[in-house]
């Protein structure tokens, strides 16, 4: 009988683990992880629980990337006097 009680330990735990992972230190690292994650999700080879945790992690990474881009845009606006100027490549 003790063995049947231990069979419940095989429940998926990847969803909470993915949500608890810290965000990458840089925009580039987050973008690379997001691209890898999207590739895995699009492959169609992941089990349902991993799809859910992957989607949750992807949402976190996307928010992080958007926040980073917004912060940089705000800094550029401050540097340019609240007026974005076209990028002039020489």
Image (cartoon, rainbow, N blue to C red):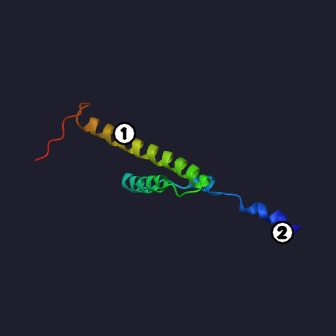
Q: Which mark is residue 55?
A: none
Of the residues under marks 1 and 2, which one precedes in the sequence?
2
* Among the 4 quarters of the image, the one containing residue 39: bottom left
Q: Is residue 54 left or right of residue 7?
A: left
Q: Residues within 10 Å of mark 2 (few under 14, many from 20)?
A: few
How far from the left and from the top, in percent, is residue 62?
44, 45
Q: Residues within 10 Å of mark 1 (few under 14, many from 20)?
A: few
Looking at this view, name the residue that lies furthest to the right: 1
Q: Residue furthest left?
A: 90
- Which residue shows up at 39% across the image and 52% down it? 31
- Residue drawn at (22%, 35%) of the image: 80
Q: Secondary structure at mark 1?
A: helix
- Residue shown at 25%/38% (left/top)? 79
Which residue lies under the disc numbered 1? 70
Task: Report, in whole angstroms, how far the alpha carbon at label 1 lies from the one at label 2.
Answer: 53 Å
Q: Which residue in the protein does label 2 denote?
A: 3
Q: Nearer the viewer, residue 64 or 34?
A: 34
Residue 26: image x %, image y %?
Answer: 39, 54
Nearer to me, 14 or 50: 50
Task: For the N terminus, give its image quadrant.
Answer: bottom right
Residue nearest the viewer, comparing 26 with 34: 34
Tag in front: 1 or 2: 2
Residue 70 picture location, percent across and down: 36, 39
């Amino acid at each position: 009988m003790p063995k049947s009680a231990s069979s419940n330990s095989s429940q998926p735990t990847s969803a909470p683990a993915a949500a608890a992972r810290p965000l990458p230190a840089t925009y580039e690292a987050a973008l690379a992880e997001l691209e890898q994650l999207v590739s895995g999700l699009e492959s169609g080879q992941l089990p349902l629980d991993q799809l859910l945790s992957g989607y949750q992690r992807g949402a976190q990474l996307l928010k992080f990337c958007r926040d980073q881009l917004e912060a940089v845009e705000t800094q550029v606006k401050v540097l340019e006097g609240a007026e974005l100027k076209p990028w002039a490549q020489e």
